[in-house]
Image: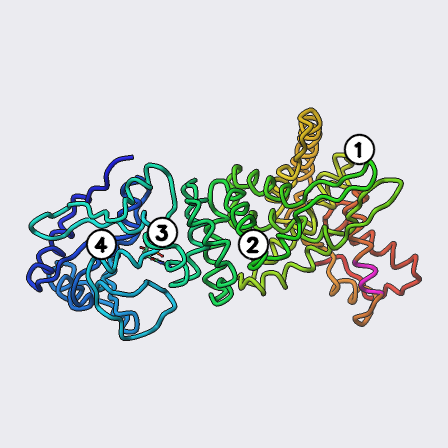
Amino acid sequence: MKLPQLPELPLFHTIADAAGELGYPAYVIGGFVRDLALERPSKDVDVVCVGDGIRLAQAVGQRLPSRPRVTVFKNFGTAMLPTPEVEIEFVGARKESYRAESRKPEVEAGTLEEDLARRDFTINALGLSLNPEDFGALVDRYDGIGDLRRKIIRTPLDPDITFSDDPLRMMRAVRFAAQLNFDIEPDTFDAIARNKERIKIVSQERITDELNKLILAPKPSYGFKLLFSSGLLQLIFPRMAQLQGVEKRGQHAHKDNFYHTLQVLDNVAEAGGDLWLRWAAILHDIAKPATKRFDPRVGWTFHGHEDKGARWTPAIFTDLKLPLGEEMRQVQKLVRLHLRPIALVKETVTDSAVRRLLFEAGDEIDRLMLLCKADITSKDHQRVARYLRNFERVEEKLKEVEEKDHLRNFKPVITGEVIMQTFGLKPSREVGELKEAVLEAILDGKIRNEYEEAFAFLLQQGQAKGLPQGHHSLTK
Ligand code: CTP
């Protein structure tokens, strides 16, 4: 790790000049400095000045050739300046803590020292000077650089104080640990366990925001283990915590579904799965505790956990304030179908079974296959290898059938409209049955998904049911 250095941008000199003129000591601060040190891609720049942040923003805006418009957030006492390179947020140093939700218009001005002390973690309390006398110098009052080197998340003050200033920081500690692969320093971790109940005063949106960032970490299981061992998970997402544990009867013990779920989640993450595929991994076995039964002949069963899990998905998304649109429906579909590809492995893989799967999964087929493959976890390596080999056969077959029949975005050529016209029927159960019969025949491979063939089949079906065919035509 190297020491953070201000990037060579005229912009920083412009800020320094404006701050100098106003007589405000100014510093680049927080996440931007941390990410410079870690050589992570940098995002927005935060600037703290000992003075009026909004005035500084306006002064800088006037000096920039692009003449950007300053956006003022009066309630927060901050101002945002978009520049061609980055967005810069200006704020005056303050005595009290940084809380996204504190909307107190009056924040008490403070010194740089006070400002740094009320930040969340030592690694986020680093600054780089924008003052003429020591331009670019590092400010590190809490050995944030040492903690970056040691890979430690630690609060600048007594963690009980830092966390009671903003309990969301408990989630942030875990999230940073997962994103950066850092440890949480033991006193800081103990304070999370001690203060966990305070998470209840934080809005669900902020909690979920952190949770999603954690889920997108390279190895999300690490973050979830920290959430679980601190007791936060039991409060913010009890259903997931309930996956933990093993029950044994005689010879029969089931696997620990919490650790299994985490393994699947890591597998999906490693394969480059996006946020929603990761959510599908988290939820794929969520209903196992609720469907668990003991059968003396076969041991533990979880029949129907995939359907129940899919049925729970909207409520879980609602509780967590996750979006309820297309993403939720995708996750729900993946949860519902997650056993299907592996079930195919166990049988002789017939075209018709593959066709059905393709039809039901639609555009989710590739993600479903990825999830299902990720779900193959066992301590027995030979068993995993055998399953994976069989799984490849299913994948090949899938490709074959897909190329031949184009079922992925399958739209039945025989619509309800055609059926009603052909037999002079009104919307009724009979129409639904005929439609279903045509669909089944296509999926079974008896006929192709092609109008003439399907229509001929429909006529046969109608005849068998004794329906009059006065209205039929062969045109679409
Ligand atoms: N901060 C804090 N307490 C919080 C949130 C933020 O002390 N609950 C401070 C930290 O110094 C942090 C800075 O405000 O570095 C900016 O916060 P934010 O943009 O949320 O986080 P970053 O550290 O920039 O990291 P990321 O963008 O990954 O969230």
Q: Nearer the viewer, residue 285 or 296?
A: 296
Assign a secondary structure to mark 3. Answer: loop
Q: Which residue is mark 1?
A: 348
Assign a secondary structure to mark 4. Answer: loop
**Ligand 1 found in image quarter:** bottom left
Residue 104, quarter of picture: bottom left
Task: Please indicate whether residue 292 sits to the left or right of residue 174 in the image.
Answer: right
Question: Mark 1, residues whose alpha carbon is within 10 Å: few (<14), some, or many (≥20)?
Answer: few
Q: Which residue is mark 2?
A: 233
Total marks placed: 4
The residue range painted magenta reads 430-435
How far apart are labels 1 and 2 at the CA level? 42 Å
In percent of width and height, residue 57 lies at 18, 64
Q: Which mark is residue 155?
A: 3
How far apart are labels 4 and 3 at the CA level? 34 Å
Q: Which mark is residue 84?
A: 4
